[in-house]
Amino acid sequence: MLLIVLLGAWLTHKYGGKSAVDKATEDPILTTVRTGLTVDQTLHLPAGVRPTADEINMQRASSTSAIQSFFTGAAAAQELDSLEETLSKEAAQQPTILGAGIENLTFRSVTVKGPTATVACTLTTWTRYTVTDPAGNTVLTEPKATVTANLTLVKNPAGRWLITTYKAASASASGSAEPQ
């Protein structure tokens, strides 16, 4: 019987049971993840309805600063690549992003080993944008996706947690497209 209890405890620990991380350690990690995921999703918000080159450059600077505040290493490079792709589309004025964000963020596990933390979570991402179809109609689209995310964070020398890897997979997606 004792063997079964010990095996159960080990399996729970190994495969996502309750986190043994104390609240004082966990809170800054969860805050970094929550804010980092929000930065990731809102990078695509335009500088204006039809932004000028100067507005796009200001957006590049402020978004780069936000990325560097919460991401480092490969995750920062991934976010910066995504930003440049977004800004290129924005300069071409297609699509026009009206809003974006995250909701229903649920942390499934948090593990800390020294200056490294791993976090598994689920969340819903949403975007609201318009595109112009081939007939010249403006179409409003509002996709949502349920996402499973796995993140690795490191504690920098100043004691701040930064996201080093961010891998997400969409479990389901939905959306609407309506002529405007």
Image (cartoon, rainbow, N blue to C red):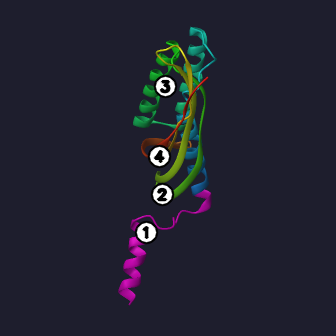
Badge 3: how crowded within 10 Å, few (<14), some, or many (20+)? many
Secondary structure mostly taken by the magenta-highlighted segment of the chain = helix
89 lies above or below 115: above
Residue occupying image coordinates x 52% and y 13%: 136
- Disc nearer the start of the sequence (3/1): 1
* Near-viewer residue (156 or 172): 172
In the image as oriented, which residue stretches furthest toward the bottom? 1
Q: Which residues are magenta?
A: 1-25
Q: Please state which of the two labelled residues, at mark 4 or mark 3, is closer to the viewer.
A: 3
Q: Quadrant of the N terminus?
A: bottom left
Q: Are marks 3 and 2 in contact (CB under 8 Å)?
A: no
Q: Which residue is mark 2?
A: 112
Q: Amino acid at mark 1?
A: His
Q: Are marks 3 and 1 in contact (CB under 8 Å)?
A: no
Q: Is residue 54 visible?
A: yes
Q: Amino acid at mark 4?
A: Val
Q: Quadrant of the C terminus?
A: top right
- Disc nearer the start of the sequence (3/2): 3
- Image label count: 4
Q: Which mark is residue 154?
A: 4
Provide residue 99's location: percent of width, then percent of height: 62, 30
* Near-viewer residue (120 or 158): 120
Q: Which residue is mark 1?
A: 13
Residue occupying image coordinates x 50% and y 37%: 71
Q: Which mark is residue 83?
A: 3
